[in-house]
Image (cartoon, rainbow, N blue to C red):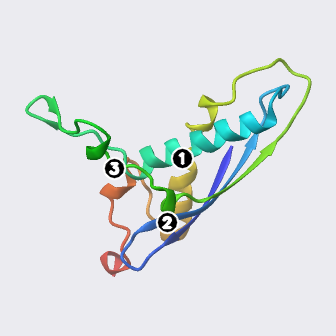
């Protein structure tokens, strides 16, 4: 589970300030490794939700490599806080489960801040500018 805190700039730019994550994946063998997995999953999910878009032109993918695919940069990375709930359940995975809840948590934060429901990703397709709401 993730909770996302954001700031919306005057021109509608979304800045993710903080992500708090609660993780319950059974017995944790390597807590630092689990934290790293969840941090990476959060950043991967934020990249996809905020910027990720694959364009198609005449049946071909427009982006040829990472230089053509907009990604989250280090300066854009939020503070990440991870809380691990350990128990004696079976050992499970910790990487992929961190990705799916990112976009809904981000969309809910945007709705709470602006009243705008994001129903299509990436977020960069939407105008969240205060001038557009006047």
Q: Find residue 110 and report its horizontal and vertical position in percent.
A: 50, 62
Pick the front one: 40 or 56: 40
Tell me the residue at 23%/39% (across/down).
63
For marks 1 and 2, give the one nearer the viewer. Answer: 1
125, above or below 113, in the image: above
Check if mark 2's residue and mark 3's residue have beta carbons within 8 Å: no
Report how far apart the C-alphas of labels 3 and 1 lie in the structure. 13 Å
Q: Find residue 124 and report its horizontal and vertical position in percent.
A: 34, 57
Report how far apart the C-alphas of labels 2 and 3 lie in the structure. 15 Å
Tell me the residue at 66%/48% (across/down).
2
Task: Identify the residue under disc 3.
Answer: 70
Pick the front one: 13 or 65: 65
Quadrant position of residue 3: bottom right
Residue 15 shows which numbered tag?
2
Q: Is there any visible trace of residue 84 in the rendered image?
A: yes
Seen as rendered, the residue at the extreme top is 90
Callout 1 secondary element: helix
Q: Is there any visible trace of residue 101 in the rendered image?
A: no
How many neighbours does mark 3 have within 10 angstroms: few (below 14), some (14-19), or many (20 or more)?
Answer: some
How many neighbours does mark 1 have within 10 angstroms: few (below 14), some (14-19), or many (20 or more)?
Answer: many
Callout 3 secondary element: loop
Q: Find residue 34 and report its horizontal and vertical position in percent.
A: 73, 35
Name the quadrant of the C terminus: bottom left
Quadrant position of residue 37: top right
Pick the front one: 30 or 27: 30
For marks 2 and 3, give the one nearer the viewer. Answer: 3
Task: Identify the residue under disc 1.
Answer: 43
- N-terminal of the two: label 1 or label 2? 2
Report how far apart the C-alphas of labels 1 and 2 lie in the structure. 13 Å
74, above or below 114, in the image: above
Seen as rendered, the residue at the extreme left is 58
């Amino acid at each position: 589970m993730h909770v996302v805190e954001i700031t919306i700039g005057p021109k509608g730019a979304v800045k993710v300030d903080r992500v708090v994550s609660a993780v319950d994946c059974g017995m944790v063998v390597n807590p630092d490794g689990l934290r790293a997995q969840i941090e990476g999953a959060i950043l991967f999910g934020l990249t996809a939700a905020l910027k990720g878009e694959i364009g198609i032109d005449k049946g071909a993918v427009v982006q040829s490599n990472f230089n053509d695919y907009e990604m989250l940069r280090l300066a854009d990375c939020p503070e990440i806080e991870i809380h691990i709930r350990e128990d004696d359940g079976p050992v499970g995975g910790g990487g992929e489960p961190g990705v799916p809840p990112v976009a809904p948590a981000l969309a809910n934060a945007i709705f709470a801040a602006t009243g705008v429901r994001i129903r299509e990703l990436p977020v960069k397709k939407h105008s969240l500018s205060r001038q557009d709401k006047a």
